[in-house]
Amino acid sequence: MSAPRVFVPGDAAALSVGADAVAATIATEAQRRGIEIQITRTGTRGMLWLEPLVEVATPAGRVAYGPVQPADVASLFDAGFLGGGAHALAHGRTDAMPWMARQQRLSFERVGVIDTLSLADYRAHGGLAGLQRAREIGAQAVLQQVIDSGLRGRGGAGFPAGIKWRTVAQAPGPRKYIVCNADEGDSGTFADRMLIEGDPFALVEGMAIAGLAVGADRGVVYLRSEYPHAIAVLRRALALARSEGLLGAHFDIDLRVGAGAYICGEETSLLESLEGRRGQVRAKPPLPAHHGLFGRPTVVNNVLTLAAVPWILRHGGTAYASFGLGRSRGSMPVQLGGNLRRGGLFECAFGITLRELVHDIGGGTASGRPLRAVQVGGPLGAYFPESLLDTPLDYEAMAAAGGLVGHAGIVVFDDTVDMARQARFAFEFCALESCGKCTPCRIGSTRGAETLAKVARGEAPSVNLKVVEDLCTVMTDASLCALGGLTPLPVMSAIRHFREDFGVRGTP
């Protein structure tokens, strides 16, 4: 009879609330009682309000307990938790918990389930089947599967991944690159980090498939220095992949650590940084697909885009496209944060409404006060009032409502929020993070913050808001990249939906 298996997350979110101490206490308590157990470190299931979430394997499936503190461990043993015994912290079978049961986990199907750094466990849960399928059907068929899946870039732009890959495949050149943009910097987002810390081989496999499809033999992951745990996990995963022949002369991946500039999440700034220069936006054309890293044809996709590919190859592009709504196909890992009772990661098909995500999944505001605003898509995303919460989460519906999906970070605010202050923060953020290359972004953001400060002081609000609106039009139309071009979204949505916070009443 094998030793009972206990699962404790080693994800940064769980570590921040004491997961290491819980794992050590469980090991010590088991030894003290003369019980042999096996502790496996996993990623997080994404139910962050329950971390550290400890699971045990039982004949009926894994049973969850959380949030567990070291002081709870002795009572868990007394309650027979190794057999799924009743306890005040017990939640029953993990896969039957409402948060988990309602999801459609495709990209995150193994996160929180497998031993993070075990290739054997990865294989046992379907890993590498996509790469094997890709090798069997060849590059052209792989490209067609990705096109058929309808997969669009999950980093924010939403460009069809298969079209980008086909462009690079058709570009001439002796060397091509696959670059993974892991410079996750949007406020309220953590899906890239969570996937790398919970299922790093999914990213490795996705990049290897991309390399096969476009004819690239080198890949690079650009990961921000603020993610030290993800860096350590990925570095170890790459070494393991090389030792088992998954990576090598046919295709290999380098890990590069960025300094954490927000602008390096923009693909051409990222390429500049990789080439050893200051992270600054390049004018387009040429596109990176034709003239990318070191002047070579380059696929630049983010973590979630590449990690979706193994599932697509394993199950087929049509199967992936069966999820979603309209032109938004497949699933999206939504990150819920801010003033919410239940924050975390929830993967589901496109089409779920913001109201379902915020109220049904997230449980409404943590403060218990009325909800006032929801920002979708990071610091450059629009603010939605309660009246627009029935908007479906898909690329076209969000755009029609004046917003964007972005990296699918959702931050909730209750009725104590000052939306004029939030609008000014958007300008201040842009001014701080601007690379300075184009005037509308560099100067416009600073002038915008100054003008909204005048509004806050009550200096001719209507006149100054008109100046802000004109400024936003220039930034939208003339900025070189999305940082300057999208900063007007949070500003104008705040003015449009929460005008009373700016010292003026009624519609402009």
Image (cartoon, grey):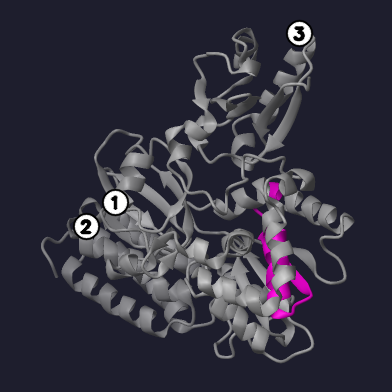
Q: Residue 403's image quarter?
A: bottom left
C-alpha gap between disc 2 and disc 1: 9 Å
Q: Which is nearer the N-term, disc 2 or disc 3?
A: 3
Q: Earlier in the sequence, mark 3 or mark 1?
A: 3
Query: Residue 28 location, x and y as percent?
Result: 76, 16
Residue at which label 2 appears: 498
| Residue 99 rendering spot, x and y as whole percentages | 44, 37
Question: Residue 426 appears in which quarter of the rendering?
Answer: bottom left
- Whether residue 273 is visible to the viewer of this picture, yes or no, is yes
Q: Amino acid at mark 2?
A: Phe
333 on left or right of 129: left
For this view, does 200 lie left or right of residue 17?
Answer: right
Mark 1: which amino acid? Ala
* Quarter of the N terminus within the rendering: top right
Q: Name the one closer to the observer, 475 or 360.
A: 360
Q: In the rendered structure, which segment of residues is drawn in magenta? A: 203-230
Looking at the rendered structure, the kind of residue marked 3 is Arg
Q: Position of residue 177 (x, y in %)?
A: 72, 77
Tell me: 91 left or right of 181. left
- Residue closer to the observer: 420 or 97: 97
Question: Which of the 4 image quarters holds residue 489?
Answer: bottom left
Determine the CA span between mark 3 and mark 1: 51 Å
Q: Are marks 2 and 1 in contact (CB under 8 Å)?
A: yes
Identify the mark at residue 373; answer none if there is no mark: 1
The residue pinned by badge 3 equals 33
Left/right of residue 83 with respect to residue 376 in the rendered view: right
SS assignment at label 2? loop
Say which of marks 3 and 1 sits in front.
3
Name the mark nearer the viewer: 2 or 1.
1
Q: Look at the picture and state if 15 lies above or below 291.
A: above
Quadrant of the snapshot with the C terminus: bottom left
Residue 216 belongs to magenta span? yes
